[in-house]
Image (cartoon, helix red, strand yellow):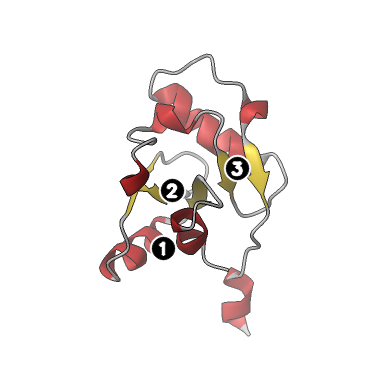
Amino acid sequence: WEAEEEILAGRLDVAVTEPLHLSQDAARGKPVLGFARFLHTDGGVLYDAGRGDIRRPADMCGKTISYPGSPGPGGPAIVNTMVKADGKTDCDVGSYGRHNGGFFHTNALQ
């Protein structure tokens, strides 16, 4: 499961991921764009810039997201912090769709 493939296929709006993945996807020529807000995590956001519906963090309000720990509260909390920091203070953390695409970083340790 690859977040950028799900986004580009239109099955997912946003993925909370590590900035490393964004640079890897961009280096492979994927039309992705991302931004990050560094808080208690080094998570960043990956999405399809070609669709045009997300241009800045505030545009993520209410989108379907995938994130490590899904369907727990962490991903929406991280994204909502980015949304609020971008000036959209009326977005409810419960407005985000949650997609559990897995978290395979532990497989690299095997």
Residue at 52%, 42% in the rendered image: 40
Q: Which residue is mark 1?
A: 21
Q: Amino acid at mark 1?
A: His
Dot 1 falls on a residue whose secondary structure is helix
Tell me which label, 2 or 1, sits earlier in the chain: 1
Q: Which residue is mark 2?
A: 44
Gap between marks 2 and 1, in whole Å?
A: 9 Å
Gap between marks 3 and 1, in whole Å?
A: 16 Å
Q: Is residue 16 above or below residue 95?
A: below
Q: Is residue 9 above or below residue 72?
A: below
Q: Quadrant of the N terminus?
A: bottom right
Gap between marks 3 and 2, in whole Å?
A: 10 Å
Towards the viewer: 96 or 10: 10
Tell me which label, 3 or 1, sits earlier in the chain: 1
Residue at 58%, 70% in the rendered image: 105
Q: Quadrant of residue 88?
A: top left
